[in-house]
Every structure is written in structure tokens, then in C-alpha cells.
Amino acid sequence: MLSDDLRAAVDADRTRDAGARFVDLVARYFEQTALGVGAVSPTAGAVSRRASFDEALPMQGRPLSEIVARLEREFLADANRLSHPMYMGHQVAAPLPAAVWTEMVIAALNNSVAVAEMSPTGTLVEERVIRWMCDLAGFGPGSGGTLTSGGLEATHTALLAARAALDPDAWKRGLTGAPPVIICGEHAHYAIARAAGELGLGTDNVRAVPSSDFAMDVEALAAMLDRLAREQRRVMAVVATAGHTATGAFDNLEAIGALCDARGLWFHVDGAHGASALFSAAHAHRLAGIARARTVAWDPHKMMLLPLAAGALIARDERDLTAAFSQQAPYLFHGAEGARSADQGTRSFMCSRRADALKVWVALQRYGASGIGAMYDHLCGLAQTLHRRMALRPDFVALHEPEANILCFRWLPEGAHDDETLDWLNQRLRERYNASGRGWITSTVLNGHRVLRVTMMNPRTNESHVEALLDGLATESAQLLNEPA
Ligand SMILES: Cc1ncc(COP(=O)(O)O)c(C=O)c1O
């Protein structure tokens, strides 16, 4: 029997007043960050919060008001504030607010989208969102897909489908013969090597094609394919990247797709970052040839600016996804033999699945496809502005033309510094700048060197913030040079 107190607590938490506490908290966060108030991330001076969360399991409940106040005081206060316009860090969005509020609806309904009868409307909305994405990619009527937890899962699923096409019995018997090869660019995301490891192919069987301007060198790919054909190695898939993680560069999908078509190879596009360029009249050309792909990974939680998690995999022929998971589960899936199943679980890695498609649907209804495209253009425009401004400075050097919203650059202070010192100085500059609370940027390694990297993910970031980034880096770098060794 539930105690009266416990029942009363659950009932009270269902009310508008209880919900308003959370809504107010988030609205305050949105207001403050929109104005750029406060630090972007915990500053070097912030008291370590570890002690706050070092507590015994709470055996008895507490008032909701107390918990929400603590969330604001201890959790939000030292969180990374991605909605702050000076956050220019990883490829995680300052999420679109209408989609944030939709999270409450998804959670409240809690309809699992693995099985159509468990989520009648969730299934329809996911189908609709996938259809829109397939249409944008130029896929025809037999196409389909599934929402995923992100790009990693989407690419894993695509490679599972490629394995099923190459060796349909692999699901049951395991792979036979020499493991096939997966080909990708040298700057491809680790999702591909991880899938190769997970699928039992072995990461040694991932072949990296060298790059030209940070995108896959197509001639080198053709040469690699010729070599593998001479060695009689099976190729399971060629993976191109549309929007490389480090630089945002786009592989030439048209040329790579044509090579795959000519040789009958599975062509997967990792468009986790850049497939959203399909919403942009100015940038969609970077995806020319995408319709040649058998599968495309595409993360709405990146450049469609949705809250985590919302990834997607679309397939030119939806049956490829069903073939990837040759599983029967009569206690869950009820489709008629041979017919297309309405249950998304038949083509998805996950069993219990959130109706994440709903927030994609709401964002598109609220801001429109043109609005999503305009935000994509705005964010890419900021990277171009930074690139232009940097050209006027002797001490910061951009390392590529930005093709998306990402720019890698290096601080080259005056004076003779060897590469090792420059690597260290760039690393330290990032640490100092981020710890100052002024902004937040990332770093990566390009051509063996530590470089600084920004990703514009916040539609409220504007040119004045780009200026503030340069000023902040200049201030911190000057202080760093004066730091005692
Ligand atoms: C090109 C690319 N592919 C895949 C991924 C992995 O996506 P997720 O983190 O959504 O799983 C990323 C993430 O940065 C990416 O940039």
C-alpha cells in the first residue's frame, strides 16, 4: 500500500504549479543566457561542486521546491551553458526552445516507438519526419528510416545493413571467409572504426583514404579500390562524410557515389553533421550526389539544433534496414509475414524508444524548413566572418576555408617557437580562455598539431560575439606569454 504522504506527493507533482517550477527554472536559464549574462562554463575560481553531490542515497523524499532550488543553485550554476552566445564548443546545439518544451510532452506520454500499438501517434510522426528527410535527400518512394540516439548508432546500423547485403547469413552464422573491408576518409569519425570493432570485422579492416583539403581524395579512393580488387578483398562499404567532425569539410559525394555505383559497392554517407545543409539554398550543393547513397546518417541534434538526443538513419530502400536486423519477436512485433511492419523496432537498434521524432516535428512546424535553413546559413556565416577577421591578424591563422559552421585555427605568437611549444601554447590558451568564463572553444589535432577549433551552434551568436572571441583570445594569449614558465 502506498502511504497517504507518498500518494499526495505524486499527485501534487502532477499539477501545473509543480510543472511551473521547472518551466520557470528553464525560462530563467534561457533569459540569462540569451543576454549573455554570466560565465559560459565554470570558471577557474568556481568552488568545486563535487562535494555538493557527494551524498548518501536519499531514503525519504523532500519538497519539490527544495529540489528545484538546489538544481538552480548547484546543478545549473556550474553547468556548461550552451545557450550562451559565447559557447562555440562542440557540435552540440543551443537547443531550439520549442523542441525543449516538447521534451516534457514526450516524457509525459512515454509512448515507446518500437511498437506501433504502443505509440500510435509517435509512430506516425516518426514516419512523417523520416519521409521529409528522405524527400530532402532525393530518395524515392521505397525509402525509409529510423530515428537513432545519434550519428554513431546511425552509422553502426548502416554498416550492419551493408553487412547483411554482403553476407545475408552473417546474422545467424557470423561472418565467413576473410573479413571484408570498410573504406572511409582519414578524418572520418570514430563511429566507423567502432562499428567495425563491434561487428567483428576488426578495426584493422577499416582502410583510411588520404585527404585533400581535409576531404577524401577521390583519386586515392579509386586507387585503393583497384588495389583491393586485385587482392580480391571484399569491400563491405565506402563511407563518405558530409561535414567532417574536425573541419566541417564535405567529401565529394557525387564522385564517390559514382565510383561505388560503377563497382556495385554499398555507399554510406555520414551526414551526422552536414546533412542538414539540405535545408539551406546556399549550402545544399555541398551534398550533390547524396541520392546515390544506400544509407545516410543525419543528426537533427546537430545542425537542426535539437536537444539531445535526435539522430536518424535514412535508407534508399527501407528493406535494407529490416534486413539488417533479422529478428522475430512475436511478443512485440505483430506485422503480417512479408508485409512492411509498422513497428519501428524491426529496423532499429533500440527496443524501448523515446518519441524523439516529435521534437523534430515540432521544430519544423514552429520554425519551418526555411527557418532551419536560415539558421544553418547564419551559423556558417559566423564561421566565415571569423575566417575573414582572422585574416587581418598576424597572430591567429585559420587552417582552412570554412565549408560549414566549424573553423580550426592556430595561435602563432610572435617569436621563434618550435612546433612542440606551439602545440603546448595552443593547448594552454584554450584552457585559459575556457576557464576565464568568457567563452568556450574546443581543440583538435590536425596534421599532427594541436589546433584550436570553434563550432557555431547557437543562433543567438552574432558578429559582435565573434569579435569578443578574438578579443578574449588576444587578452588571454597576452597574459599567457607573461605567465611565469
Ligand atoms: C561526422 C560525425 N559522425 C558521427 C558523429 C557521432 O554522432 P553522435 O555523437 O550523435 O553519436 C559525429 C559527432 O560529432 C560526427 O561529427
Image (spheres, rainbow, N blue to C red):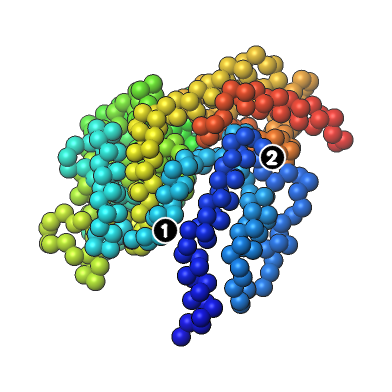
Indicate which disc, 2 or 1, sits on the residue closer to the N terminus. Answer: 2
* Residue 346 visible in rendering: no
Q: x and y percent of residue 414 in the render?
A: 76, 20
Residue 107 tag number? 1
Determine the CA span between mark 2 and mark 1.
30 Å
Which element type, helix, strand or loop, lies under badge 2? loop
In the image, which disc is placed on residue 306? none
Given the image, on which type of amino acid does mark 1 rest?
Ala
In the displayed structure, 41 sits above or below 110; it is: above
Could you tell me residue 312's position as x and y percent? Answer: 35, 45
Q: Position of residue 224 (x, y in %)?
A: 36, 34
Which amino acid, by three-letter code, is at mark 2?
Gly
Q: Residue at x 23, y 54 (%)?
A: 322
Q: How many marks?
A: 2
Question: Label 2: few (<14), some or many (≥20) within 10 Å?
Answer: some
Q: Quadrant of residue 28?
A: top right
Horizontal placement of 363 versus 234: left or right?
Answer: right
Q: Residue furthest top?
A: 392
Q: Quadrant of the C terminus?
A: top right
Q: Residue at x 67, y 50 (%)?
A: 77
Q: Is residue 435 left or right of residue 167?
A: right
Q: Quadrant of residue 410?
A: top right
Residue found farthest to the bottom: 1
Query: Label 2 belongs to which residue?
Result: 38
